[in-house]
Amino acid sequence: MFEATKEQIEEWKAKHKDVWLLKVGADSACYLKKPSRKALGYASMAAQSNPLKFNEVILEDCWLGGDEEIKKDDNLFLSASKKLAELIEIEDAELGKL
C-alpha cells in the first residue's frame, strides 16, 4: 500500500489546502485533493456520453499520489468511485435582495 511521508502530506496541504486519504480494499490507497472547477465542467460534459468518464476525470484531477492500480483495476476503480462525490464540497450561500 502506498504511504506518503508526513513531509509530502504537509507539502500537499500547503499547495491544495485539503488532502484526503482514500483506502480502497485491503491493499490500496491514494491521496486526493478537491477537484478544480475546470475538471468538474469537463467531467460533467464527458458524463453525458459515458457516465464512468465523470469518475475517471475527477480521480485523475484530484490524484496527488498513491497506488496506480486504483486507476487501472476495474474493481478498485469502481470502489473508489463510490467516494469521489464526497470531494465535491459545496458551501452554503445566501442571496439577499437589497
Image (spheres, rainbow, N blue to C red):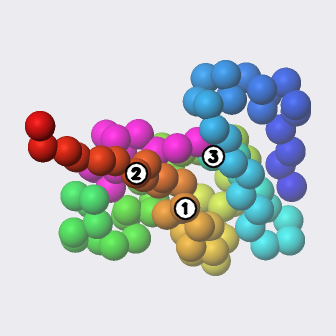
Distance from disc 1 to disc 2, alpha carbons, whole Å, reads 16 Å
Question: Which range of residues does the magenta coloring cover?
Answer: 33-43
In the rendered image, residue 40, in percent from the top left (x then y), is placed at 34, 50
Distance from disc 1 to disc 3, alpha carbons, whole Å, reads 11 Å
Circle 3: element type: strand
Circle 1: element type: helix
Q: Amino acid at mark 3?
A: Leu
Asked if residue 37 lies left or right of residue 91, the reply is left
Image height of 94 relative to 13, above or below: below
How crowded pointer 2 is (Cα within 10 Å; few <14, some 14-19, many 20+) is rated as few
Q: Earlier in the sequence, mark 3 or mark 2?
A: 3
Q: In which quadrant of the rendered image does the N terminus lie?
A: bottom right
Q: Residue at x 77, y 26 (%)?
A: 10
State which quadrant residue 74 falls in: bottom right
**Residue indicated by mark 1:** 86
Q: Which mark is residue 92?
A: 2
* Residue 6 lies in the magenta-colored region: no
- Nearer the observer: mark 3 or 2; the answer is 2
Distance from disc 3 to disc 2, alpha carbons, whole Å, reads 23 Å
* Residue 38 lies in the magenta-colored region: yes
**Residue indicated by mark 3:** 32
Q: Residue at x 46, y 45 (%)?
A: 35
Q: Outermost residue, left direction?
A: 98
Q: Residue at x 71, y 58 (%)?
A: 22
